Amino acid sequence: MHVLCNLVLTNYNLNEIIKPPLIHNPMINSHMLPSENSNQFIILNLIENDLRCSCLVTGLEDLGLEAERYQLTLTESIFTLLGFSPAQMTEELLDAYYEEIGKGAVMEIVSSPQRLELKAMEIMEVMLFKRGE
């Protein structure tokens, strides 16, 4: 997970990386978006923040800074909200989640609210599929 985000802090404004989650835009169909009072909204918000943080941590590590300890630990909350029982929260599930986060923790996704929302939805769908296996 160390070379997933090509982030050079001197070339990016941190306000462009860390934006308010779930900025609604016309590119995403409104029926796809959850209401702000739903668990789905909270789950997507948590996944988006996990993506942003993973990109930032990876970029800091690429610059030679030890940043792994600043990684968010949102997985238990996300999995609980998704309806996973404690017995279902296995290492295999965690590995699958972090693999998906790794695919999305790139500047091209994190710096675009539309792509970030779509990637968070995709990750949520993958995890829900895993729950059904």
Image (cartoon, grey):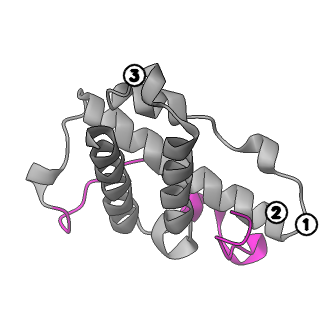
- Few, some or many C-alpha atoms within 10 Å of disc 1 (few <14, some 14-19, many ≥20)? few
Element type where label 3 sits in the image? loop
Given residues 23 and 57, the one toward you in this image is 57
Q: Does any portion of residue 20 appear in the rendered image?
A: no
Query: Which residue is identified by label 3?
Result: 85
**Residue 70 picture location, percent across and down:** 75, 42
- Residue closest to the eye, 81 or 50: 81
Q: Is residue 101 above or below residue 11?
A: above
- Residue 35 x, y percent position in the rendering: 19, 36
Determine the secondary structure under disc 1: loop
Q: Mark 3 or 1 closer to N-term? A: 1
Which image quadrant is residue 128 in?
Answer: top left
Residue position for label 1: 64
Q: How far apart are marks 3 and 1 (CA)?
A: 38 Å
Write down the region rendered in magenta: 1-28
Magenta stretch, main secondary structure class: loop
Mark 2 residue element: helix
Q: Where is residue 44 in the image (x, y as percent from the top left)?
A: 36, 43
What residue is disc 2 on? Answer: 61
